[in-house]
Image: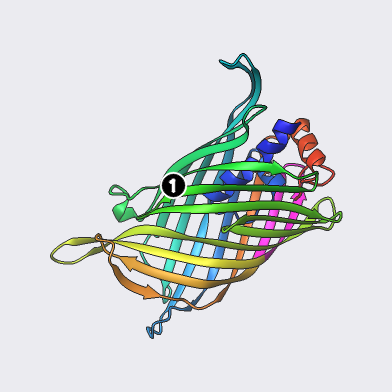
């Protein structure tokens, strides 16, 4: 059971870091699943005295696919036995992003994000728990799809279990998207009373969950996300490659209904704020910088659990991460 507790917490780190979840809780990320999601930002003033309005629509899918899970018995040079549990998952994502300027699609067909990652979760008597992972992807328009600027990430984290209702983690992520960044991360999962729970992976996401019934619960969430996509400007003389960077903080509430054992439907609404939009040339020089105004957004997601074993349910119940059924929907 000790190994399984650690593996569950490690999956939070890897899943949230490599993909922008609609919302999250530790127990939801333990199960292999495929999630379809979409959200829409109401157009708001672009800023900078332009008088134009910037909008954004996002849709896509995200999948968690296990590819290895086993317990291994080892023997070191110091003649000591070591019991090790390993769990490896494949993370896949496709997202269609469509920015608009005064209602016009720019670029015409938006941006497409494709990414793939592999995570190895390893717990042993000798080395405790470590999580290793990495992934790569790209965000491009149709015109730059065959001249991509890929991004990649890699990370490691150490996990600690402080009783049945509190878990913490700390680690770091090394990411490249036009520039190399080192990001320290800290995570916590804490249960308050019977129906309240706080999950956070700082500086990326924070979630407060209230479980009203076995099949219905509410999330209050905050998250930092965005995109960095390539596009092309064509003049009579040449074709010029550009890069557009966008980031925002999302504050919202979602209502979640768990149906037919394997299906979860969520509706979400809130605001996006602290928004920033920049464009760069091929020499990474800033060409424009805007701060679009705070605006409402709405979103929806459908998650299908591809595997729900009794063993997984028992893990989440023992740790206090989920409800009576094992998943804190």
Residue 242 seen by the camera: yes
Closer-to-camera residue (271/169): 169
Q: How many marks?
A: 1
Residue that protrudes farthest toward the left in the picture: 237
Percent from the top left, x then y, of residue 298?
61, 67
In the rendered image, the quadrant that contains the N terminus is: top right
The residue at the point 72 percent across, 45 percent down is: 27
- Describe residue 123's horizontal placement relative to residue 211 as left or right: left
Badge 1 crowding class, 10 Å Cα cut-off, few under 14, some 14 to 19, many 20 or more, is: some
- Describe residue 275's horizontal placement relative to residue 65 as left or right: left
Q: Is residue 271 above or below residue 257?
A: below
Closer-to-camera residue (33/273): 273
Closer-to-camera residue (324/191): 191
Question: Is 265 colored magenta in this rendering?
Answer: yes
Q: Which residue is mark 1?
A: 114
Percent from the top left, x then y, of residue 179?
36, 55
The residue at the point 37 percent across, 69 percent down is: 278
Which quadrant of the view contains residue 213?
A: bottom right
- The part of the chain drawn in magenta is 253-268
Which quadrant of the view contains residue 294?
A: bottom right
Q: Is residue 83 above or below residue 234?
A: above
Question: Is 30 colored magenta in this rendering?
Answer: no
The residue at the point 60 percent across, 48 percent down is: 170
Residue 61 seen by the camera: no
Closer-to-camera residue (185/317): 185
Percent from the top left, x then y, of residue 128?
65, 33
Which colouring convention does the figure follow?
A: rainbow
Percent from the top left, x then y, of residue 312?
74, 35
Secondary structure of the magenta portion, mostly?
strand
């Amino acid at each position: 059971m000790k190994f399984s507790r650690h593996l569950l917490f490690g999956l939070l780190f890897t899943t949230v870091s490599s993909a922008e979840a609609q919302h999250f809780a530790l127990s939801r990320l333990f199960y292999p699943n495929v999630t379809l999601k979409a959200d829409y930002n109401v157009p708001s003033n672009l800023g900078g005295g332009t008088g134009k309005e910037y909008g954004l629509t996002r849709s896509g899918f995200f999948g968690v696919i296990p590819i290895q899970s086993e317990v291994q018995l080892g023997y070191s040079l110091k003649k000591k036995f070591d019991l090790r549990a390993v769990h490896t998952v494949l993370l896949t994502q496709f997202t269609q992003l469509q920015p608009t300027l005064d209602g016009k699609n720019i670029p015409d067909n938006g941006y497409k994000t494709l990414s793939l990652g592999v995570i190895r979760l390893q717990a042993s008597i000798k080395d405790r728990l470590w999580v290793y992972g990495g992934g790569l992807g790209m965000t491009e328009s149709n015109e730059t799809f065959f001249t991509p600027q890929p991004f990649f990430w890699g990370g490691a984290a150490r996990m600690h279990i402080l009783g049945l209702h509190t878990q913490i983690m700390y680690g770091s992520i090394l990411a490249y998207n036009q520039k190399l960044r080192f990001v320290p991360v800290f995570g916590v999962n804490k249960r308050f009373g019977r129906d309240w729970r706080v999950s956070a992976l700082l500086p990326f996401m924070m979630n407060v969950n209230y479980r009203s019934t076995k099949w219905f619960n509410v999330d209050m969430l905050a998250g930092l996300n965005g995109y960095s996509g390539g596009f092309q400007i064509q003049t009579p003389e040449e074709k010029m490659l550009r890069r557009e960077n966008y980031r925002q903080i999302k504050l919202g509430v979602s209502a979640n209904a768990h149906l037919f054992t394997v299906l979860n439907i969520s509706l979400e609404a809130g605001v996006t704020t602290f928004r920033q939009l920049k464009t760069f040339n091929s020499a990474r020089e800033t060409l424009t910088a805007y701060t679009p105004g705070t605006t409402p957004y709405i979103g929806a997601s459908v998650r299908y659990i591809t595997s729900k074993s009794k063993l997984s349910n028992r893990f989440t119940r023992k740790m206090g991460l989920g409800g009576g059924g094992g998943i804190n929907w």
